[in-house]
Image (cartoon, helix red, strand yellow):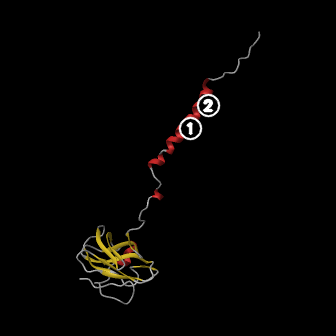
Amino acid sequence: MRRTLLAPRTGGLTTSLRHVFPVAALGAALALSACSTQSPTQTNVSYNAADGVPVDLGDVKLRDLVVISSGKDKPGVLSAALINTGASEQRVAFALPNASPVEAVARPHSEQQLSDGTQVQLASVPASPGDVITLTVQSPNAPAVVVDVPVLSPSGYYATLGATAAPAQSTTSSPTTTATP
């Protein structure tokens, strides 16, 4: 008996898989890459990475401006980084609606914390911790800026910033405070 060898198959299942697999891989890659079009890169979105708000007054800039107060209608302390890129000293005024302003002095070419040295205090904060208040911030060389500032409780890393006593006038060190009604 004579046996004849069968010729190898051409086509069939393996050939169709060879054609389908690259197409499927390309389709999966396109589908997965579309995810990034629906979720933009977060580092391209500008945001304030602090508890407080920024305020720009020309050469004077405030970063992370917050009010620290233990309760509604109680005294509050301003906390922020006060930056002066100008060559002259600048007085910065902070005022609640219908209240006298308090002031801080920004030394030329400096960065300082409002809470270092003498506290800059508001006599009475019309909001509880967790709320926001409207505060007008102004320097002589820039127009006034009205900003919504968060009120935080004196806890955590703000624990040392609670209001000490009724605000009193002080002109001995920077930042300074002025009397409020």
Quadrant (top left/top right/bottom left/bottom right) for the N terminus:
top right
In the image, residue 33 lies at what x, y percent? 51, 45
Q: Nearer the viewer, residue 61 or 124?
A: 61
Q: Indicate the secondary structure of the residue bearing disc 2.
A: helix
Q: Position of residue 141 (x, y in %)?
A: 37, 78
Percent of width and height locating residue 62: 39, 74
Label 1 element class? helix
- Kind of residue at badge 2: Arg
| Placement of 97 over or under 10, stated as above or below | below
Front one among 36 and 3: 36
Q: Which mark is residue 92?
A: none
Q: Amino acid at mark 1?
A: Ala
Residue at image x 27%, y 75%? Answer: 96
Q: Residue at the location (57% across, 31% down)?
A: 20
Q: Provide the residue designation for mark 2.
A: 18
Quarter holding residue 125: bottom left
Q: Which label belongs to residue 25?
A: 1
Image quarter for residue 112?
bottom left
Quick check: 145 above or below 164? above
Rate crowding at label 1 as few (under 14), some (14 to 19) or many (20 or more) other CA atoms within 10 Å. Answer: few
Q: Say left or right for 32 vs 138.
A: right
Viewed as shown, does residue 84 lie left or right of 74? right
Name the outermost residue toward the top: 1
